[in-house]
């Protein structure tokens, strides 16, 4: 019999607002909350980093288990995700997690040298809670693992006796694989027979992510197109062969966004709030942004926004080249981001060479990211690959048509402004299909040409504003998957 509400253990290395380094945290906070709202019995499992313990001071004991790697025990504490009623189980082992620095790296930079043991323990606890060794009153029907940090959990379950609930492995970014030396197999108490090509061995090393992909029951990614792309050599990062073999159990479920935090009708970061019926207020946000960033106040000048990590993956070199090509054509740019120091410097030099036309802010400021989304006329996001992406959805929700490369979740969430889509009233942005500066610049010019037609541009904005990118739809798809597996 299929449980109406299967019990789900959602294992992750970060979850907003407890701890965040990237998009995984956004998903791990929002998806469980959306599932919980649909009636799912779900608990998040997360390491007891110092930041997590500080935000969960009223956590209570849940369970205790022996530490498999070193003498002593590991405590499990239970709390609630802030501002929700979603239960959170915290792996409270101070020697591994309660430290200064980030989840994966030291404050001075560089990965923690014991990351294999740290996330081996997280995976072990996830498997323990899902196995016959768990004697608590709460027994999960589904184990949902996320990215390499929890990838060993399905492997542990495969080699343990007794009950084995189905496991799901969600790949948020295949580029990060959790690779460690072969000596870690014994250190992590994995059986020698697991260290082979048909197992967790990866070019002579151990890969946490490969373990999850190989031993789990179902694989999901964060968009349907990315699920297809990672089966090809170009974006398969060495695992495309295994993913092709497992394609029958591989699918893509599109991420959602926090539609309360990203809502131009109520956004506290905006000087002027607006919706599809009051888009004139968006023009006021543009003027306010130009004034705040030292750009020339010009309502007619197309203003292109960019909020991004400054990296090769995000196409920052392409964005820099497009700035160089288009700034002399009267286009303004407002960039917010941080990353590669050499490219950061190149952006700063570009801004100094074109005062009043280009604004560059190195770093990250939540409020400014919202004001750029609201104040820009269009949003540039030339990622070389994008498993799902968030900013292209934020942009559409703010009536700021995105301009992106046709890849991953970008292709799944943007309706290109082709003549057919424009005629049907379904166009919401602009896609380019060749990853180079000329194709990207041409897409921006195509956007600017439509921008010069106010009525057509307004229809494009309204179509974008009306897209539903809430988590409810995605959570419903995951709930269907959980129920099918629980059968």
Image (spheres, grey):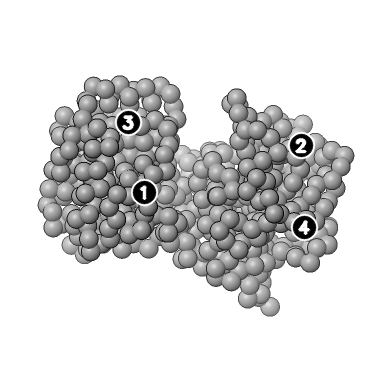
The tag earlier along the polypeptide, 1 or 4, is 4
Query: Residue placed at 32% from the left, 45% from the top?
Result: 371
Q: Can you identify the residue that label 1 sits on?
A: 269
Image: 474 above or below 359: below
Between circles 3 and 1, the one closer to the viewer is 1
Q: Can you identify the residue that label 4 sits on?
A: 62
In depth, the one of 222 and 43 nearer the eye is 43
Q: What element carries label 3?
A: strand
Q: On the rendered structure, is 82 left or right of 405?
A: right
Image: 108 above or below 2: above
Q: Distance between the residues labelled 1 and 4?
A: 39 Å
Between circles 1 and 4, the one closer to the viewer is 1
**Residue 192: x percent and y percent?**
80, 40
Between circles 1 and 2, the one closer to the viewer is 1
The tag earlier along the polypeptide, 1 or 2, is 2
Q: What element carries label 4?
A: strand
Q: Can you identify the residue that label 3 sits on?
A: 360
Q: Can you identify the residue that label 2 sits on?
A: 95
Residue 142 appears in view = yes
Q: Distance between the residues labelled 3 and 1?
A: 19 Å
Q: On the rendered structure, is 76 left or right of 379?
A: right
Q: How far apart are marks 3 and 4 (CA)?
A: 48 Å
**Residue 275: x percent and y percent?**
28, 60
Q: How crowded is mark 2: few (under 14 residues within 10 Å), some or many (20 or more)?
A: few
Query: Residue placed at 84% from the left, 38% from the top?
Result: 70
Q: How many marks?
A: 4
Residue 296 in which image quadrant: top left
Q: On the rendered structure, is 395 left or right of 388?
A: left
In depth, the one of 108 and 132 nearer the eye is 108
């Amino acid at each position: 019999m299929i449980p109406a509400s299967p019990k789900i253990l959602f294992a992750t290395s970060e979850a907003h607002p407890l701890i965040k380094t990237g998009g995984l945290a956004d998903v791990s906070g929002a998806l469980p909350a959306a599932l919980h709202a649909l009636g799912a019995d779900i608990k998040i499992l997360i390491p007891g980093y110092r930041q997590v313990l500080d935000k969960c001071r009223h956590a209570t004991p849940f369970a205790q288990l022996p530490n498999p790697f070193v003498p002593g025990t590991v405590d499990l504490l239970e709390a609630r995700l802030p501002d929700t009623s979603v239960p959170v189980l915290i792996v409270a082992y101070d020697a591994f997690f309660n430290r200064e620095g980030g989840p994966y790296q030291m404050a001075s930079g560089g990965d923690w040298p014991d990351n294999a043991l740290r996330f081996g323990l997280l995976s072990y606890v996830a498997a323990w809670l899902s196995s016959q060794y768990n004697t608590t009153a709460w027994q999960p029907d589904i184990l949902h693992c996320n990215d390499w940090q929890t990838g060993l959990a399905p492997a542990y379950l495969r080699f343990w006796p007794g009950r084995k609930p189905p496991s799901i492995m969600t790949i948020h970014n295949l580029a990060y694989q959790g690779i460690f030396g072969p000596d870690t197999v014994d250190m992590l108490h994995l059986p020698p027979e697991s260290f082979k090509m048909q197992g967790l061995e990866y070019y002579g090393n151990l890969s946490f992510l490969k373990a999850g992909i190989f031993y789990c029951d179902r694989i999901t990614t964060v968009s349907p197109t990315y699920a297809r792309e990672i089966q090809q050599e170009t974006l398969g990062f060495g695992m495309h062969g295994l993913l092709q073999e497992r394609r029958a159990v591989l699918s893509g479920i599109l991420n959602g966004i926090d539609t309360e935090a990203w809502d131009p009708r109520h956004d506290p970061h905006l000087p002027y709030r607006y919706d599809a019926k009051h888009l004139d207020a968006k023009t006021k946000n543009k003027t306010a942004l130009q004034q705040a960033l030292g750009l020339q106040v010009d309502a007619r000048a197309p203003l292109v926004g960019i909020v991004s990590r400054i990296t090769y993956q995000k196409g920052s070199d392409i964005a820099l080249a497009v700035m160089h090509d288009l700034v002399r054509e009267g286009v303004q740019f407002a960039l917010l981001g941080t990353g590669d120091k050499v490219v950061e410097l190149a952006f700063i030099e570009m801004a100094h060479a074109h005062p009043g036309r280009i604004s560059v802010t190195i770093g990250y400021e939540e409020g400014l990211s919202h004001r750029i989304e609201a104040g820009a006329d269009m949003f540039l996001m030339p990622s070389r690959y994008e498993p799902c992406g968030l900013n292209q959805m934020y942009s559409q929700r703010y009536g700021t048509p995105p301009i992106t490369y046709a890849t991953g979740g970008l292709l799944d969430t943007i309706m290109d402004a082709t003549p057919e889509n424009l005629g049907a009233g379904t166009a919401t942005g602009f896609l380019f299909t060749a990853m180079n500066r000329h194709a990207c610049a041409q897409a921006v010019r195509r956007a600017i040409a439509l921008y010069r037609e106010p009525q057509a541009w307004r229809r494009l904005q309204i179509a974008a504003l009306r897209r539903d990118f809430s988590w409810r739809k995605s959570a419903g798809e995951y709930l269907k998957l959980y129920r099918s597996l629980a059968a």
